[in-house]
Image (spheres, rainbow, N blue to C red):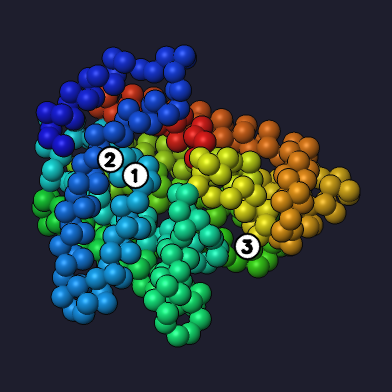
Amino acid sequence: MANDAVAENDLRLTADRPTEGDDPVGAVLAAYTRDLVEAVDHTLAAFLSDEVESLRAIDAAMGGFAATARECVLSGGKRVRPTFAYWGWRGVAGGDTPLPAVLPALAALELLHTFALVHDDVMDASATRRGRPTAHRALAAQHVAAGRRGDPDRFGDSVAVLVGDLCLVWADRLLARAAVGADRLLDVRRCYDQMRVETIAGQYLDVLGESDAANWSVDRALRVARYKTASYTVQRPMLFGACLAGVGPDEPLGVAYTRYGLAVGEAFQLRDDLLGVYGDPARTGKPAGDDLRTGKPTALLMLARQAADPAQRRALDRAGGATDEREIADLAEVVATTGAVDRIEQMIADRVSEALAALDLAPIDETARTALVGLATAATRRQA
């Protein structure tokens, strides 16, 4: 995507906001990501083509392994993290700064995201992702089709872990290609490393919560949302983008980005909590009710337990043990009758308001401000 194309797109978007008769959520999200997603995908495809070939040269078997990793990266996704990083950068750099210099860094965030998704699916034993078999399930099926010896599920899990690890290394390699000064790249790397540490911390707390749900709380569920999702989905990508433009996290704009990013990121996860129970599988690409099947102590489930009467609490105690679709639907109804869904919706709305307030006084480019206002709503009202 050339710089001229970015500037033209910005002008069109500020002039042609979606109307009430459109699908405002989908229209805003698509409008503010369309050209960027194309540029990120092109950057990833070119980078991965060379990387897959270099692995194939090691051994013929590596070709299939590397191709699976590439497919995990390129098989859809909304490119949310590169989008927030771009607008974090754009808010500082303005419309006249060439984008190609920072595209490798923006695209690297998608490789980091793939690492997290593949490992998360193994830990959650998830069957589908984006409407397709998860990496470990696809690899297990390959094991069976090839007639290999041993447990196909163990093979699938083991190789999926390696796929995730490879994506993490690829992210480092691609980030190093950003055409910014060495000192600035070092600052960017510090932000990137902090994002990775916080993601792992949030993921550990998520795993711990499933094994210790009786001792969990709403506050702890929100802490998981902050570190597992908010940090590496919105807050840190925006600070990452600001660092690419030479602005640090302690400067006024960095403080505003942190406030906005945490609020939108937490709201993003709270929406995920709702979609994990009530989402349409045709849109989410995952079975409905998965969180109830596993008993994951999300903020939604913790609020439901907190507000439940004795009969409702006894019903909610079945979360994590229910497998029948009728049971899952009944549990979802119990959660709703406690008022937890309405409380989560209010928490999402409050966080979006907090995010927009953070932008009011932020010293950023006006086109970026308009985009971030739209994205705050779109990312938290989505249906997938």
- Residues at circles 3 and 2 in contact by the CB criterion of under 8 Å: no
Residue 249, position as x, y percentages in the image = 32, 46
Q: CA distance from mark 1 to mark 3?
A: 28 Å
Q: Which residue does the numbered mark 1 point to in the structure image?
A: 79
Mark 1 surroundings within 10 Å by alpha-carbon count, few (fewer than 14), some (14 through 19), many (20 or more): many
Mark 2 surroundings within 10 Å by alpha-carbon count, few (fewer than 14), some (14 through 19), many (20 or more): many
Mark 1 element type = loop
Q: Which residue does the numbered mark 3 point to in the structure image?
A: 209
**What amino acid is found at the position of numbered circle 1 in the picture?**
Arg
**What amino acid is found at the position of numbered circle 2 in the picture?**
Val
State whether residue 158 appears in this view: no
Residue 343, position as x, y percentages in the image = 67, 35
* Identity of the residue drawn at 63% across and 41% down: 278
Which dot, 1 or 3, sits closer to the camera? 1
Toward which corner of the image does residue 246 lie, by quadrant? Answer: top left
| Direction from residue 258 to residue 209 in the image, left or right | right
* Identity of the residue drawn at 76% across and 49% down: 326
Which dot, 3 or 2, sits closer to the camera? 2
State whether residue 277 appears in this view: yes
Residue 239, position as x, y percentages in the image = 31, 45
Nearest the eye: 141 or 29: 141
- Residues at circles 1 and 2 in contact by the CB criterion of under 8 Å: yes
